[in-house]
Amino acid sequence: MVDIVTDSCADLSSELIHQFNVRVLPLQVFIDNRTISDGSISPKELFSLVAKTGELPKTSAPSIKEFLEFFEPSDEIIYIGISAKLSATLSNSLLAAQQLPHKKIYIIDSKNLSTGIGLLVLKAAELRDQGWTAEEIVREIRAMVPRVHTSFVIETMEYLYKGGRCTALQAIVGSVLRIRPIIEVRPDGMLGVKAKIRGTRVKALDAMLEDLRLHLPYLDLHRVFVTHTGCDEDAAYLVESIKSMAPVEEICVTQAGATISSHCGPDTIGILFIADAHSNTEA
């Protein structure tokens, strides 16, 4: 059987990992003089350590050695990983695969993060279970990569500032004006600001819902993700709104892991979905 694997940036819950029979290689987070494996700490616990230390966590990609060990159990593997533009994880997986020429290892750059990766992983697992060959799955998933839409609301600009993605002045002004950026994953796999919402948090959530609504004619109704860093009420609001908007077969709600949480901060929440090639990506 084809082994479908990913990294912890995919933000898949343990239930989904078990249900779809996929394997996950964790990244590492460094904070409070400790090395913590992604998946072993909740966003709430992580943010408590940030408050305690006053430091932003540092994250680390799996090493080539870790990938060699991760690839060892199987002879035919499809690895779908975090965007190569955002992490060294994918390049390390490629270097490891080159050292295992006796195995069939296919590396797919999701050009995405969080459950934007997860959408592709679960689709690959479903195709495997339907009897598709590894080559067929790889072709289908690679064609699907540009169809994944990922956007999320940032509640505080503190993490963007500490991570070097905005200046101190921008962070202060953004806080005073109550600006909530909506961050998107762009087609090249980089992050960008999709919108700057001024006003209430609900206004920002509704802006993401409006973006989904504009994609409805082309939306893949099979599965949509709502992923967050610890804001259950907002997640429930988005789920109910999506249900009233479209007959989506499965709306999966997951919490972001430590790696994603380290870079986006508390009360971040996103909607992630697949829309076909005719969809207006500028909507």
Image (spheres, rainbow, N blue to C red):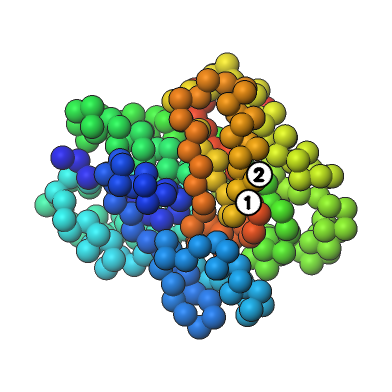
Q: Identify the element where label 2 is drawn.
A: helix
For the C terminus, the quadrant is top right
Residues 243 and 189: in front is: 243
Amino acid at circle 1: Cys
Q: Which residue is mark 1?
A: 231
Q: Quadrant of residue 267?
A: bottom right
Q: Which residue is mark 2?
A: 234
Residue lying at the far top in this picture: please name it: 217
Residue 37: % across, % down: 41, 68
Q: Identify the element where label 1 is drawn.
A: loop
Look at the picture and state if 27 lies above or below 206.
below
For residue 218, side relative to residue 174 (left or right): left
Mark 1 → mark 2, Cα distance in angstroms: 6 Å
Look at the picture and state if 58 lies above or below 101.
below
Question: Dot 1 surroundings within 10 Å: few (below 14), some, or many (20 or more)?
Answer: some
Q: How many marks?
A: 2
Residue 3 in view, yes or no: yes
Residues 184 and 266: in front is: 266
Residue 112 in view, yes or no: no
Residue 262: % across, % down: 57, 63
Q: In the rendering, which numbered label is found on residue 86?
A: none
User: Which residue is found at the position 64% from the left and 59% from the top?
Assistant: 266
Residue 250: % across, % down: 46, 30
User: Which residue is found at the position 52% from the left and 53% from the top?
Assistant: 256
Residue lying at the far bottom in this picture: please name it: 33
For residue 32, side relative to residue 14 (left or right): right
Amino acid at circle 2: Asp
Look at the picture and state if 238 lies above or below 278.
below
